[in-house]
Amino acid sequence: MSDWQRQPVTASARPANDLDVVVVGAGLAGLYMLHRLRGLGLAARAYEAGRGIGGTWYWNRYPGARCDIESLDYSYSFSEAVQQEWHWTERYASQAEILRYIEHVADRFDLRPDIRLATRVIATTFDEVAGRWTVETDRGDRVTAQYCIMATGCLSAARIPAIPGLETFAGRWWHTGAWPHEGVTLTGRRVGVIGTGSSAIQAIPVIARRAAHLHVFQRTPNFSVPARNAPLDPADERRAKADYAARRREARASRAGFVTPATEQMERSALAVAPAVRRRAYEARWERGGLGFTSAFADLGSDLAANDTAAEFFRAKIRATVRDPLVAEALSPRDHPLGTKRLCADSGYYETFNRPNVTLIDLRTTPIAAITSRGVLTSGAEYPLDDLVFASGFDAMTGALRAIDIRGRAGVSLRERWADGPRAYLGLMVADFPNLFTITGPGSPSVLSNMIVSIEQHVEWIADCLAHLRAHRFRAIEASAEAEAAWMAHVEELGNATLYPLANSWYMGANIPGKPRVFMPYVGGVGAYRQQCDDIAARGYAGFSLTA
Ligand code: NA7
């Protein structure tokens, strides 16, 4: 029995290098985990690579960065006081406001003393004899803990594509996910943006207003819906706060972790209604703005013909917005169904291409050959640039975990275990890695949902699990290989019943050369997923082995 099973202790009462729990990461997941561990009386410490807390919202400071989920939903629900007192200024919160919120929560719950900033965990190794994890950092720390909780984020391993010649570029360059904290002045500069995913689609309209000229290098056009961001409507805020618990309950039981107003058609097939009805439904969603568009009909995610009615609606909107028909066509997605790459939410994205200082370069017709000292060289021309922005995405879901040398039983490495794609039971634990949890890991809804809803669910499930282990005097919990295999088969089966596998998306690992093509998240919805996690816990953690 470890000390903490006998009596609650505080971090300061324990030897500095002998902890109950190490949490890796101090973003939204790591911070709430730390808070819950404190509540259990455990000696816990979080290590955070950034010089500040906040994870995604610490790193992604590019112009225009904001959340694509409404602020009333993209916020912690665990504290009624915080959710009542905090005032969001906009329908969609900016990066700066979300970071202020995260810092407020960390201070309010006094989390900072147990966080080591600017310290990257590089390895964690399970000692089978001691039943403990040894965690090593890039600062030379070496601590042991009974439990190791990875709160490393799903979109935290920024990726710069291997384009030859970057080292020769004489201008400045950055990745959107590692933006300089001092900020950068783009006024009057010749700027290039590589990529047209969510980050680029947020950044491009803002950069275009500042730059002398903006070149957008697009490989794959994306679907984007107007966000319709605005100051938060005081009536909406009052309504939400009058019964926040109900709003949160609905979100937790929903598919995506947020709820859009129900409509008559949303349970029907897009093909079962007359074209005029369909159009009205799409127009209403377009006018409302935001990611709720894809729930206009029940089968947009599963039926290609139904999906194409929505895709064509988007293409018509692009044609109606972008004056140059060739540019409009180049911006029109045709190689993947709507929503199979994460739908983007923008503020004036398509309109930006009507500006005289913005040029779209279609890399499908003229691919990038190299980066030169002057700028970007495609098969068609060289584009001289002062600044180059890589909005080129992340090694999603597994990148941050694989960056750490994680070794379980008999020295087995997670990297090798996942060589053919990630495998995990419920996206929470991996067989042969006892007492190691992954918050929003592959095989859980995570990136398909309002992340904070999924984060809270995992944190609470893990905290309850640790309390259960303590109450029943277990020392270890581990996913069984059979349960893991069955869960992954279930994840795959659900994924294959959707249109997701048709896209070369980061959900599929397709944006990383050599990464196995596997649909990584669980697509059954956060409500159904939560139910399964709760049932499994109620059945004495079925599929896990608990050892005394
Ligand atoms: P994404 O969505 O992965 O977008 C990355 C973009 O960069 C995408 O348009 C890529 O084109 C493009 N890309 C990547 N590599 C290259 C190369 N070598 N050449 C040209 N273009 C390239 O990342 P984001 O940061 O925008 O968004 C990530 C998530 O954050 C988002 O879904 C939200 O959940 C929040 P491709 O499509 O691969 O052809």
Image (cartoon, rainbow, N blue to C red):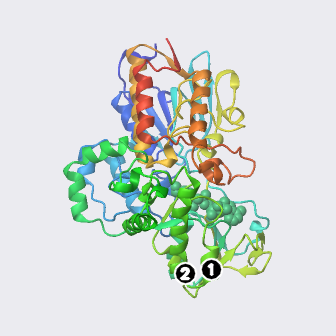
- Marks 1 and 2, how far apart at CA: 7 Å
Query: From the viewer's perspective, is residue 67 above or below residue 25?
Result: below
**Quadrant containing ligand 1:** bottom right
Question: Farthest bottom residue?
Answer: 356
Residue 519 picture quarter: top right
Q: Residues within 10 Å of mark 2 (few under 14, many from 20)?
A: many
Q: Nearer the viewer, residue 143 or 280?
A: 280
The yes-or-no answer for disc 1 within 8 Å of ligand 1 is no
Taking depth in this image into account, of 200 and 437 the one nearest to the observer is: 200
Q: Is 37 rendered above or below residue 272?
A: above
Q: Indicate whether 461 appears above or below 158.
A: above
Q: Is residue 359 visible?
A: no
Answer few, some or many: residues within 10 Å of disc 1's Cα (few below 14, many 20 plus, some between 14 and 19): some
Disc 1: which residue: 327
In the visual, does 194 lie left or right of 316?
Answer: right
- Disc marking residue 546: none
Q: Is 9 or 411 nearer to us in this picture?
A: 411
Q: Residue at x 21, y 48 (%)?
A: 243
The residue identified by callout 2 is 322
Q: Secondary structure at mark 1?
A: helix
Instruction: Give yes or no for contact between labels 1 and 2 (Cβ–Cβ under 8 Å).
Output: yes
Please report the residue visible at 68 percent of the width from the left and 51 percent of the height from the top.
510
Q: Is residue 38 left or right of residue 184?
A: left
What x and y, as percent, mark residue 231?
31, 69
Upstream in sequence: badge 1 or badge 2: 2
